[in-house]
Image: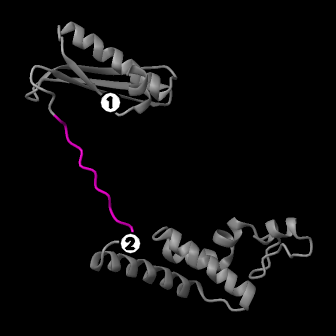
Amino acid sequence: MNAKISSIQQDFRKDCSKCGASAETLIHALKDCPTARAILTLGGLDDFITTLWNSWNNRNNYVFCGKEEEGRVIWDRAKTLCQDFRIHNLVNKPVLPLTLTLKKWEKPPCGTVKINFDATVFNNKTGFGVIVHDSDGFILGGGGGFKYEDITAEWAKLYAFEEGLKIVCSLNITKAIFKIDCAILVNRVN
């Protein structure tokens, strides 16, 4: 951090005041400085953000107040804060409430079929799937496959929609509801 500040304010030292490294970058202050490394070694990546926050506070206490704590003390403080936070959320209304979303398949109206389709793209490979259900939840048909070309997710979902239309036509279905979670495609089709 001192390296960045010294590039803005010329009379500011850019070396690490804790260990004497030639340039105190953010990575050095949070990972490479011996105290920071001791903290991360003790805690690993458990409660990573709280550990970094405590490490940063320790660095600031050293720079501005001249006092520094051992890595073990900082790690114990971070661990205790995280445990206290978890206990608080168990005993009281959570500080960060969980928002549960109930997702389930919904039946189409009687005499109508529902076509669920989706697609995904990864490493120039597109996978897609289509399922056709009647109003009782009975599967009437479906399909899926892969395409080996680099296309966007929206184009992949459009391709899955096209495959769904082909299945609907092959089954001579006259009333259908198409279901997808891609807002861009829904808005274009509507």
Q: Secondary structure at mark 1?
A: loop
Residue type at the position of mark 2: Val
Residue for badge 1? 180
- Which residue ends up furthest to the right in the rendered image? 10
Residue for badge 2? 95
Front one among 174 and 158: 174
Q: Quadrant of residue 57?
A: bottom right
Residue 160 picture location, percent across and down: 35, 21
Residue drawn at (61%, 74%), measured in percent from left and top? 37
Measure the alpha-carbon separation of dots 1 and 2: 33 Å
Q: Quadrant of the N terminus?
A: bottom right
Ranked by sequence position, the earlier of labels 1 and 2 is: 2
Q: Secondary structure at mark 2?
A: loop
Residue 149 picture location, percent across and down: 49, 20
Rendered view: 80 above or below 107: below
Q: Quadrant of the C terminus?
A: top left
Residues in magenta, as a range: 96-106
Q: Is residue 12 left or right of residue 142?
A: right
Kindly report the secondary structure that dominates the magenta region of the rendered protein. loop
Residue 152 picture location, percent across and down: 50, 26
**Residue 81 tag number:** none
